[in-house]
Image (spheres, grey):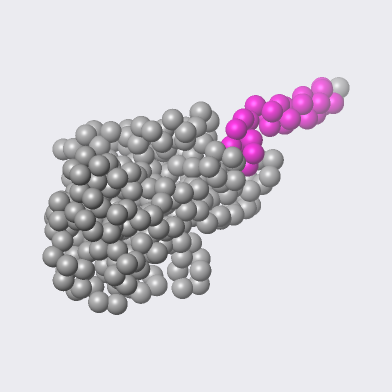
Amino acid sequence: MRLMPLMLAATMLAAPAMAADLTGTLQKIKETGTITLGVRDSSIPFSYLDDQQKPVGYAIDICYKIVDAVKQELKLPDLKVQTVSVLSSNRIPLMANGTIDLECGSTTNNVDRQKQVAFTNTHYLTASMFVAKKASHLTTIESLAGKTVVSTAGSTNIVQLNQANATRKLGITVLAAKDHAEAFLMVETDRAAAFVMDDIILASFIASAKDPSAYALGDEAFSLAEPYGIMLRKDDVPFKALADKATSDLYLSPEGKAIYAKWFQAPIPPKGLNLNTPMSKGMVHAYAHPSDNPDPESYVE
């Protein structure tokens, strides 16, 4: 009986000690009881709004697997999930300043970005392409010479477009749209001849256009297939380790392949579009060998 007060005191001391051991994002989440996800409005099928204005998509589903891991790690079954809409141009600053804890979208993991933020395991591979109206007969990068071409502000694609323009001396007038939807609309309304973006996102816009048959992807890519990853803060080792394990476990499981098929090989809300995009060899490799490697060459089979 005399040991009981001592045991109780030890237990009371242990709880604050465990909280004090937490750092970075996990500490922030524990203290606030909330995890904040950065979501996109129009990055179909990765992160977009359905007809109820609810964020849905492939990257959203992956983020919720990380959320489940956080709940278990912190013993917070009632953890509140908050979403914040982000753009290509502000997603990295909002991650760096602590506004969002995970960015659930279509963000390319590359060496330059890894100087500012971190990424968990690759969840998609996509090459930078362009879409144009079939009537314009634009099929190669050279055919864009002298034209007005749009891309999304803050994206790797607009950087690649500017590089190709300068290197090849194409004389392209480059426009920066605030988001993907605005960029595609500029092609639709003939304010731009082409829209440069990741191939899968372009495919989703073509599929959802009023007349999909009026548009086509170019035949030439601006890049090798580059990796997408869920973005998180840099130098937060415990949180990244948790996210890496959660995503690795998912990709190596049948559930991971089922989530992929749900968003890329079946009708998706709100219009029932089916992108009919089975896993490439690179994606099969990425799922079988989870990695946050930013080098596109590492995914070439």
Task: Find residue 134 and report its image quarter.
Answer: bottom left
Expressed as whole percent of the image width and height from the top left, the position of residue 252 reads 32, 42
Up-down relation of residue 102 to residue 203 (above or below) = above
Point out the stretch of residues depicted in magenta.
3-29
Up-down relation of residue 8 to residue 134 (above or below) = above
Q: Quadrant of the N terminus?
A: top right
**What residue is shown at x 62% (from left), y 53% (from top)?**
80
**What residue is shown at x 23% (from left), y 33% (from top)?**
298
**What residue is shown at x 78% (from left), y 30% (from top)?**
12
**In front here: 22 or 54?**
54
Expressed as whole percent of the image width and height from the top left, the position of residue 3 reads 82, 22
Q: Main secondary structure of the magenta part?
A: helix
Expressed as whole percent of the image width and height from the top left, the position of residue 150 reads 32, 57
Q: Is residue 153 magenta?
A: no
Up-down relation of residue 268 to residue 290 (above or below) = below
**In front here: 63 or 203?**
203
Expressed as whole percent of the image width and height from the top left, the position of residue 266 reads 28, 66
